[in-house]
């Protein structure tokens, strides 16, 4: 490959890296849908929360712990999405993505997950999802008095139609004492999901 062609290829790769599109249109929760809630009715409260400085974000609060066969349990997951009738955002199959979000709250044992939608269904709760392996570059850390950033990457499978980042309260007392309390909450803001164009650019340069 000539130096001129290599320069042109490198220029366009660098240009594209600057404009990777966020799959989620409402990642800052200022207006519109706050996503899809997977939980038993009456166990949670989802709201658009405004901080003292005017910043808007999503707030998910645990308001009731369930009683299961093995004791207390809870399973509340908010999944990203701009359309309340569908889960997640449109995504490509067999593609590496990176994501980030900001978290703050009074419960540190909240998990972050990524699911891909493999079958889109109506009603929405019949949608078929699969959980993806996440490589965290900045792990989950939640504090009550400051926002913390979470970052990671994941790769979709050949079945992927859509993807969603989820924030989850989950526990069952058959695995140990209940670690959540009614009133626990987490604030969620500034979610970004975008194709990992840096890796794609490296592959393009390797295979011109």
Image: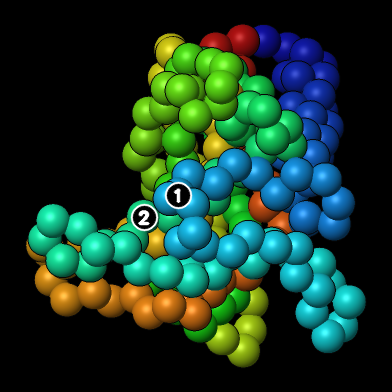
Q: Is residue 146 above or below residue 18?
A: below
Real-space Cα distance between discs 2 and 1?
Answer: 6 Å
Q: Position of residue 167 (x, y in %)?
A: 50, 55
Q: Nearer the viewer, residue 54 or 204?
A: 54
Q: Are marks 2 and 1 in contact (CB under 8 Å)?
A: yes
Residue drawn at 49 percent across, 29 percent down: 125
Residue 175: x and y in percent read 12, 64
Image coordinates of residue 57 in percent, x first then y, are 74, 65
Residue at 81% over, 24% down: 12
Vertical arrangement, residue 39 with respect to residue 123, above or below: below
Q: Is residue 115 above or below residue 146?
A: above
Q: Which residue is mark 2?
A: 75
Among the 4 quarters of the image, the one containing residue 46: bottom right
Query: Which numbered marker is on residue 39?
Result: 1
Which label number is shown at residue 79? Answer: none
Determine whether the residue tagged by mark 2 lies in a helix, strand or loop: strand
């Amino acid at each position: 490959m000539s130096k001129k062609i290599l320069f042109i290829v490198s220029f366009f790769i660098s240009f594209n890296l600057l404009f990777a599109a966020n799959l989620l249109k409402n990642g800052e929760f200022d207006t519109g849908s706050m996503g899809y809630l997977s939980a038993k009715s009456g166990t949670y409260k989802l709201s658009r929360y405004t901080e003292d400085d005017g910043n808007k974000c999503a707030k998910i609060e645990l308001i009731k712990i369930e009683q299961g066969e093995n004791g207390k349990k809870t399973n509340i997951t908010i999944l990203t999405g701009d359309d309340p009738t569908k889960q997640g955002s449109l995504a490509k199959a067999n593609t590496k993505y990176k994501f980030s979000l900001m978290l703050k709250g009074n419960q540190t044992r909240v998990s972050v997950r990524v699911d891909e939608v493999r079958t889109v269904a109506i009603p929405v709760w019949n949608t078929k999802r699969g959980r993806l392996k996440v490589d965290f570059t900045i792990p989950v850390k939640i504090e009550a008095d400051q926002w913390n950033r979470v970052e990671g990457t994941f790769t979709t499978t050949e079945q992927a139609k859509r993807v969603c980042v989820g924030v989850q309260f989950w526990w069952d007392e058959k695995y140990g004492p209940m670690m959540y309390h009614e009133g626990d909450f987490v604030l969620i803001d500034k979610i970004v999901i975008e194709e990992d164009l840096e890796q794609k650019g490296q592959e393009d340069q390797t295979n011109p």
